[in-house]
Image (cartoon, rainbow, N blue to C red):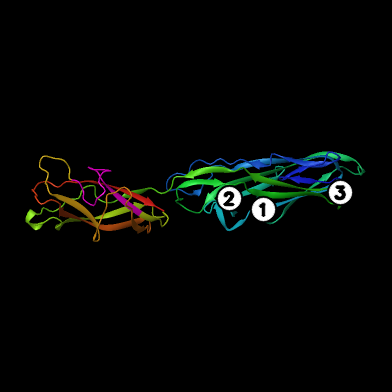
Amino acid sequence: MATVCVVSGLLALPASALAGCAASGNKIVPSISDVPTDSGGMISSVWHSATMSLICTKMPSGTYTNTMGATGVPAGASVEFDGASYNLYQTNESDVFYFGTSSVDGGAEHGLSSNVYETVREIGFSGSSGRVFDFTMRSTVKIRFYSPKKSMTSGLRTINTLDVITGKITHTKPGVYNGIWTMRTDKFTFVAKGTSCTLTTPANIKLKQVSMVDMPSVGSSIAGGAFVLGLKCSTDAPAFQVSYSMSDVYNHPSNLSSYLSLADEPTRAAGIALQVLNGTNAISFAPSANTIMGNLRSGTISQPMTVQYIRTGKIATPGKANAAVTVTFTYD
C-alpha cells in the first residue's frame, strides 16, 4: 500500500512508493482590467479557468472515484448570469465575490456548490486483477468575479489566493489508494475607479450692488447674494460622507484667511473683501480647511451658502468686487 503526502494541494509520493497520482495545472491566474467609473456588477469580462491533470501511474486496477466540492466561504447569495443561477463565494475584499463551474474530462459543467460531485473511473479489464495501469483524470474549473455594488468605491483591490475546489481520489477498496487535490487561484490586484460626480453650482453668481455707507466701519458687513453648493452623482452611488474645501483663485495658496481677494482690475474696489458663509460661519480658504457637508442621498447632496461684503480697511473706495473660488470635494 502506498502512502500519500499532500503538499500545497498537490499529491506527492515518497521516493520508495510504487504508485500514485500527481496534480498539475491546478492554478487559475485571474487578470481583471480596471473597473470603470460608476461601475460594478460583473467585474470579470471573461471566465478565468484552468484544467488540472491528475496524472496517475502504476495504479492497481479497479474502480476509482473522484469526489469534489467547493471549499470557498458561501456568501449566502446567488447571481444570475447567461440564464443560469450561480452561488456566490466570498473573497477577502468585502465587495468582491466569485462564482463558477467545474467539469471532469470534458463532461457537463456543474455550478460550484458545497454539495459533493462525484465521477467514477474503471481502470483495467476483466481478469486484470493484480496488474497496474497509468491513467489521467482532468478537471476544468472556471470562475468569474462579481460585485453587488453598481458603483464600487474607488481604490485598489487585492484578492488573495482562493482555494476554489478540493477533490479526493480514492480506490473503492479501502486502503488501496486515496489522495487529495486542490484547485486554487493566484493572488491578483485591480483598481476600481469609483464614482463620478458633477458640480451643480452655477459657474457665475451675480451679487447685488451695495453702498459703502452700508459698511461704515472695519468689520461691518452686508449680504451680497446666495447660492446652493451642490453635487450630483449617479443615483446608485454609495452614501459617502462628503466634505469640501475652497481656495482663493487670485491668491492661492497664500490666502489662509476667510477674506476673498478681489480680481486685479482698474476699477477694483478697495478696503472691502468678500466672504463665503455656511450658515453664520465664514469659510476659510486655507488648503487644509475641510468642511463636512453630509452624506450622499440617492447620489445628490447640497448646501445653501451665502456671500457677504465685509469692510477690511479704514479707507474704502467703491468699484468692482469680482472674486473666484475653486471648490474641491472629497468623500469617504
Could you tell me the amino acid type at mark 3? Val
Residue at the spot of label 2: 98
Q: Secondary structure at mark 2?
A: strand
Residue 32 appears in view: yes
Q: Is residue 245 magenta?
A: yes
Residue 109 appears in view: no
The image position of residue 261, as x and y in percent, is 19, 46
Residue reaching furthest to the bottom: 280
Q: Main secondary structure of the magenta part?
A: loop
Q: Residues within 10 Å of mark 1 (few under 14, many from 20)?
A: some
**Residue at mark 2 to residue at mark 3: CA–CA distance:** 36 Å
Task: State the residue in front, 294 or 55.
Answer: 294
Q: Secondary structure at mark 3?
A: loop
Task: State the residue in front, 107 or 55.
Answer: 55
Mark 1 or mark 2: whose residue is earlier in sequence:
1
Mark 2 or mark 3: whose residue is earlier in sequence:
2
Residue at the spot of label 3: 176
Residue reaching furthest to the front: 314
State the extent of the magenta-drawn residues as a range.
Answer: 243-261
Q: Is residue 277 left or right of residue 24?
A: left
Task: State the residue in front, 79 or 176.
Answer: 176
Q: Is residue 331 above or below residue 54?
A: below
The image position of residue 277, as x and y in percent, is 23, 57
Q: Is residue 252 magenta?
A: yes
**Residue at mark 1 to residue at mark 3: CA–CA distance:** 26 Å
The image position of residue 144, as x and y in percent, is 57, 46
Mark 1 or mark 3: whose residue is earlier in sequence:
1
Residue at the spot of label 1: 71
Could you tell me the amino acid type at mark 2? Tyr
**Residue at mark 1 to residue at mark 2: CA–CA distance:** 12 Å
Could you tell me the amino acid type at mark 1? Thr
